[in-house]
Image (tube, rainbow, N blue to C red):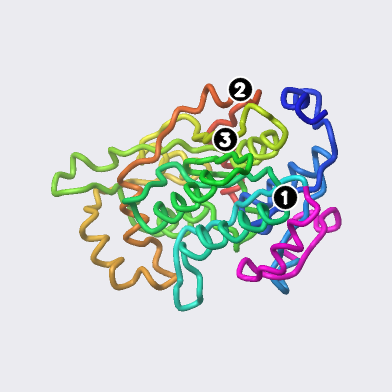
């Protein structure tokens, strides 16, 4: 029976399941597709029209066309499946294009949760974010709202809160932190910014992040599907913590570039971001600066052990894709 299968992942997935996946063409979603197929599952995915080419291993997925605002398409994707994974997320908004945190992080998740309840699909796995909170940035608040909405249902839910996720994005239209940092800041012929709050440059870069590899994240999601011990639980996912300057130097070294850093007061960057943050070509928004300076650290060693997953380190070898 399925209840006996939660601890059998060391021998491979115990049963073939149909998994509704929302966000399959995104950075993390593309790796979840791989992991589902690797474990013998069938991904049932919702893909926007003309975006099928972005889908990894499309021949092994059942594809439904539509978007996250289309309730009929959502119901069609979820109906008859064994579990739902929601990993749609964006790192910045473009309201003029209808791309907002509120719609994609909260309302999209809410529609899928409501559909799962209506169709009797009890297993629901949500991708949130480390640092999600009610009084945070728009990104953090909408992630928190989706969490709370899911928690107050009778579904068998699991919530994952990853820190900074890194790994090969596979294409230019999948935002990935290290690739974007290299492109927008480190490749410029000027020192890399070492951000700090206030007026004291000695505080530059004194915030830390816990990078976790995207394959590790995807493995957590897929292993959790049948693990009874993960029901009604929230997991913070992160690797070893590094200060900002060390992250910059590791990324630069990965693509064989020497890079200096220079203290950069956050208030100056915020002023520029106030006027330019709405443009895609500007490298950072005020909200991103706020979250960066807060730091994003968690200790997930016990979680790695519980799931029997080996942590992929953040180093020049695992950042090899930056050489491209």
Q: What are the residue bounds of the magenta stretch? A: 53-81
Q: Residues within 10 Å of mark 1 (few under 14, many from 20)?
A: some
Whole-angstrom CA distance, mark 3 to mark 2, is 16 Å
Name the residue: 51% across, 65% down.
103
Q: Which residue is mark 2?
A: 306
> Could you say where residue 288 lies in the image, as x and y percent from the top left?
37, 55
Does 160 appear above or below 271? above
Q: Mark 3 or mark 1, which is nearer the start of the sequence?
A: 1
- In the figure, is residue 203 to the left or right of 84? left
Element type at mark 1: loop
Image point (70%, 53%), residue name = 21
Q: 59 or 281, which lies in front?
A: 59
Q: Which mark is residue 165?
A: none
Q: Position of residue 176 (x, y in %)?
A: 54, 52
Residue 58 part of the magenta-drawn span: yes
For mark 1, what is the residue? 120
Q: Which residue is mark 3?
A: 232
Dot 2: within a 10 Å radius of its alpha carbon, few (fewer than 14), some, or many (20 or more) residues?
Answer: few
């Amino acid at each position: 029976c399925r209840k006996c299968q939660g601890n059998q992942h060391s021998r491979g997935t115990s049963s073939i399941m149909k998994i509704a996946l929302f966000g399959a063409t995104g950075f993390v979603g593309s790796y979840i597709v791989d992991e589902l197929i690797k474990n013998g599952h069938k991904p049932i995915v919702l893909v926007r029209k003309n975006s099928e080419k972005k889908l990894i291993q499309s021949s092994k997925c059942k594809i439904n066309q539509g978007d996250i605002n289309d309730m009929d398409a959502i119901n069609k994707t979820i109906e008859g499946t064994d579990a739902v994974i929601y990993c749609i997320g964006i790192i910045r908004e473009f309201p003029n294009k209808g791309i907002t945190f509120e719609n994609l992080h909260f309302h999209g998740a809410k529609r899928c949760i409501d559909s799962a309840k209506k169709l009797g699909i009890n297993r629901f796995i949500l991708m949130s974010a480390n640092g999600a909170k009610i009084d945070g940035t728009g990104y953090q608040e909408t992630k928190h709202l989706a969490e709370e909405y899911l928690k107050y249902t009778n579904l068998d839910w699991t919530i994952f809160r990853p820190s900074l996720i890194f790994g090969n994005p596979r294409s230019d239209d999948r935002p990935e932190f290290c690739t974007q940092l290299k492109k927008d800041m480190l490749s410029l012929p000027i020192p890399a910014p070492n951000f700090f709050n206030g007026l004291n440059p000695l505080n530059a870069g004194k915030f830390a992040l816990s990078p976790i590899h995207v394959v590790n994240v995807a493995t957590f999601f897929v292993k959790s599907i049948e693990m009874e011990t993960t029901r009604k639980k929230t997991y913070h996912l992160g690797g070893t913590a590094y200060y900002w300057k060390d992250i910059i130097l590791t990324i630069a070294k990965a693509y064989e570039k020497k890079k200096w850093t220079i203290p950069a007061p956050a208030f100056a960057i915020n002023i520029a971001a106030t006027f330019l943050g709405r443009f895609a070509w500007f490298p950072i928004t005020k909200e991103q600066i706020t979250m960066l300076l807060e730091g994003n650290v968690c200790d997930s060693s016990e979680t790695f052990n519980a799931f029997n997953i080996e942590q992929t380190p953040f180093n020049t070898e695992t950042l090899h894709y930056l050489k491209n």
